[in-house]
Image: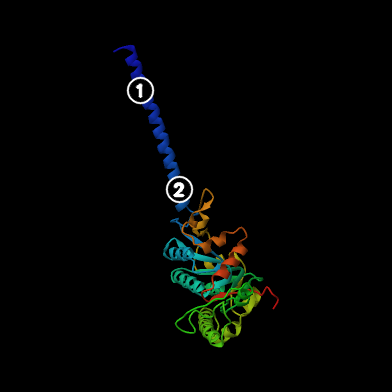
Amino acid sequence: MSASDVEEIVARRQQRRKLGRWRIAAIVFALIAIGALVWRVAGPGSEMSLNAQIAKVKIEGTITEDTDLLDRLDRIASTDSVKGVVLMIDSPGGTSVGGEAIHDAVRKIADKKPVVAQVGTLAASAGYMIAVAADHIVARQSSIVGSIGVLVQYPNVERGLDMIGIEMDAVKSSPLKAEPSPFNPTTPAEREVLRRVVDDIYEWFVGLVAARRPLSVDETRRLADGSVYSGRQAIANKLVDALGGEDAAIEWLESKGVEKDLAIVEWKPKDEYRFLGVPLGMAGEGPLDVLDRLPLPLIGQWFKRQLMLDGVMAVWQPSRTGG
């Protein structure tokens, strides 16, 4: 064997050792990365943790039939490690169907574990509908609570179209089909149809509150004239149970046997998990959802409400005209 052959063999062995070290380093790095991911997903501060925890869920802004929120509530109900739930509510309301769906999802949780609602600035209309699903309601003294009722709002743009020379025509199977329309004045018959719908859903809402609060139907109806109440007024009217913040909510959970030292874990919506700064939950969003992404959230919410004309609303909207 020549000297050059020996040198080649030695060089190959050195190359193998280098590759072996790189492979070991890559495996160690991969194990560390996997371990970090598992810790993030299932560690003590994660919603997926096997350790006992108190789940915190924020319900904010306009209430809709939010599939992401409903999915989280469903998972909370079936997660044995969740021993109690705090709902952080700050909402003026929204669609009555959205409020009903979330209310029912919260009641499914409450069948298995204690649920407390903590009202921030506002829990009105459909927001309050969700709050009454909890076993206990805590509000700040200056929180705004109530606005028990429903409404249907629709624009009439007939005069505006006349000004620009546009006329709308329609062929329909019956006089009340697709009425009321924004393109012609509302007739008494059309208004009566909506009145019956609003009255029926209002009675359902009143019955829902009466069933969940220490109030008779008549007492609830007296309070359900659309009025809002401060936290202090709400406790006097039995619409909430206690005054305070998150600490008061946790204290109530402790009174129901939930250990006081459990980690409080926020169950977040999908779009709060990001990759390269882009919310992962944006995939599959519709055009109306994108309005929520406008730099000024209130503008996005306003446009979204104007476009969502179908459905009965349970929402507190203070007049901006002074009327």
Residue at 53% over, 65% down: 86
Q: Is residue 81 above or below residue 177?
A: above
User: Measured from the top left, where is residue 29 in percent x and y?
Assistant: 44, 39
Residue 232 picture quarter: bottom right
Residue 165 picture quarter: bottom right
In space, the residues marked 2 and 1 are separated at their CA atoms by 37 Å
Q: Are marks 2 and 1 in contact (CB under 8 Å)?
A: no
User: Measured from the top left, where is residue 43 in percent x and y?
Assistant: 47, 52
Q: Is residue 109 visible?
A: yes
Residue at 56% over, 62% down: 291
User: Measured from the top left, where is residue 278 in percent x and y?
Assistant: 52, 52
Q: Is residue 238 left or right of residue 40?
A: right
Q: Is residue 297 above or below residue 210?
A: above
User: Measured from the top left, where is residue 93 in percent x and y?
Assistant: 57, 72
- In the rendering, which numbered label is found on residue 37? 2
Residue at 37% over, 20% down: 11
Q: Is residue 56 visible?
A: no
| Count of marks placed on residues | 2
Query: Mark 1 highlights which residue?
Result: 12
Mark 2 or mark 1: whose residue is earlier in sequence: 1
Q: Quadrant of the N terminus?
A: top left
Taking the view exactly as shown, the residue that stands out farthest to the front is 165
Query: How many residues crowd mark 1 within 10 Å: few (<14), some (14–19), many (20+)?
Result: few
What's the residue type where badge 2 is placed?
Leu
Q: Nearer the viewer, mark 2 or mark 1?
A: 1
**Foreground pick, 179 / 220:** 179
Which secondary structure, mark 1?
Answer: helix
Q: Is residue 81 above or below residue 202?
A: above
Q: Quadrant of the C terminus?
A: bottom right
